[in-house]
Image: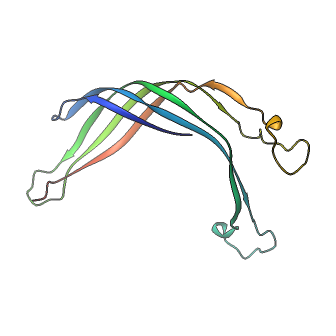
Amino acid sequence: MGETHLSLRLQPRTGRFRPYVEGLAGFKYLFTRITVGDEDFGNDDLGDDELGDDIAESTNYDDFALSGGAGAGIDVRVCQKREPGKTLRAVGVHLGVQYLLGQEAEYLAEGDLTDENENGQLDRSELDVRRSRTTFLQPQFGVTFRLADTD
């Protein structure tokens, strides 16, 4: 699943503690992808990162769902340098949460792709399509680095 949202945030520009509230609007993209790979079972000399290459890849099912919601959180400055000429001016921690209401979307869950009639392809009748709302609560945590302005 991938998502993208535009946000409008209300937050003080300065201060050590900068709480905020925000409104969000966007969409979510749900997809089921199959990848077939060559694992090269006969060669024990290969390392873990050399198990083989992908031979084929396909997106079997996808759907879009509109989404919107609200968020709140706080940015806390934990360190600030006031010395001229320094590149790094401040380090902060970001804590927040977003509640995103989403439309219903269709998707395939893991293990739902089975070629039941063994004809070598997935027919529409063989897909166990599920449908549910895409609403969820999304916690956020991050670290921010503020750089000095350069002239």
Colour mapping: rainbow
On screen, residue 55 above or below 17 = below
Q: Position of residue 13 (x, y in %)?
A: 17, 34
Residue appearing at x 8%, y 57% in the figure: 84
Residue at the extreme bottom: 45
Against 137, residue 57 (above or below) is below
Q: Position of residue 51 (x, y in %)?
A: 70, 67
Which quadrant would the N terminus be assigned to in this image?
A: top right
Residue drawn at 14 percent across, 54 percent down: 149
**How far across and how far down the image is residue 73, in percent?**
33, 28
Q: Indicate whether 105 appears above or below 45.
A: above
User: Viewer-proximal residue, 134 or 98?
Assistant: 134
Q: Residue at x 28, y 27 (%)?
A: 20
> In this rendering, would 62 be left or right of 84?
right
Q: What count of labels does the image hold?
A: 0
- For residue 6, which quarter of the picture? top left
Q: Is residue 72 left or right of residue 136?
A: left
Q: Looking at this view, is 83 or 63 the one in front? A: 63
Instruction: Point out residue 143 in the picture as x, y percentages from the top left corner.
Output: 33, 45
Query: Would residue 124 appear left or right of 51 to someone viewing this image?
Result: right
The outermost residue toward the front is: 124
Q: Quadrant of the C terminus?
A: bottom left
